[in-house]
Image (spheres, rainbow, N blue to C red):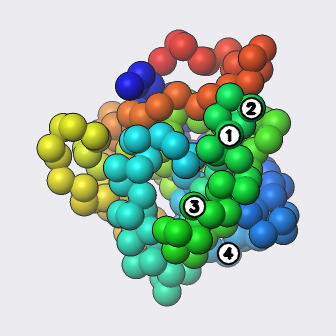
Amino acid sequence: MARTESTMLPLITAAPDFALPDTDGSIVKLEDFAGARALVIMFLCNHCPFVKHVQHKIKEIADKYIDEEVAFVAINANDIEKHPEDSPEKMKEEKAALGYAFPYLFDETQEVAKAYHAACTPDFYVFDMGQRLIYRGRMDGASPGNDVPITGEELMEAIDATIEARTLPSDESQKPSIGCNIKWKPGNEPDYYGAQ
């Protein structure tokens, strides 16, 4: 299992714009979440064992904050020619099977993933009400085979701090996510690929 780390996009970065199709065919845009008390962008996919390890906790956390005006958005940017299990049709099945209440978007061109400097799945970003980045990296320390409990504590602390307008600990305390690398289309690899 190849492991890749988050690139750790600089804090206070404005959320890069997007307009991507959801599993029902509707187009979901960044502007749809204007006014959310916090916005959680997650780069996920269907087949990655790192995602599979925590996907039920992701659903639990999203459900927990649904009444707190916190928006969650999942984006899959994998090359589906090499990984057909990550196709939009399979994404629709996955969303239904897991009961995700949030959009699960397909980034066919991979340009949105590049704009976020996304490197792995899962990869998490938390933006404040002004859609400025206040947290990026991992959900918690759990990974397949490391026996660390899946708590989601680091992601939830970031969300709580955002909706309570508290300052998060220093940049250095935020730890990168570890997961499978995004499956870039041949020749479409970003300049940061392999540099983490």
Relative placement, left or right, of 168 versus 103 is: left
Name the spot of residue 64 as percent of width and height, x first: 40, 78
Relative placement, left or right, of 8 versus 117 is: left
Q: Disc 2 and disc 1: Cα gap in Å?
A: 6 Å
| Residue holding disc 2 | 81
Marks 4 and 2, the one that precedes in the sequence: 4
Marks 4 and 1, the one that precedes in the sequence: 4
Question: Residue 157 is drawn in which quadrant?
Answer: bottom left
Q: Disc 4 and disc 3: Cα gap in Å?
A: 28 Å
Marks 1 and 3, the one that precedes in the sequence: 1
Q: Residue furthest bottom?
A: 67
Three-letter code for the amino acid on which mark 2 is drawn? Glu
Q: Can residue 115 be seen from the camera position used here?
A: no
Question: Residue 117 is drawn in which quadrant?
Answer: top right
Secondary structure under badge 3?
Answer: helix
Q: Disc 1 and disc 3: Cα gap in Å?
A: 13 Å
| Residue holding disc 1 | 84
Q: Are marks 2 and 1 in contact (CB under 8 Å)?
A: yes
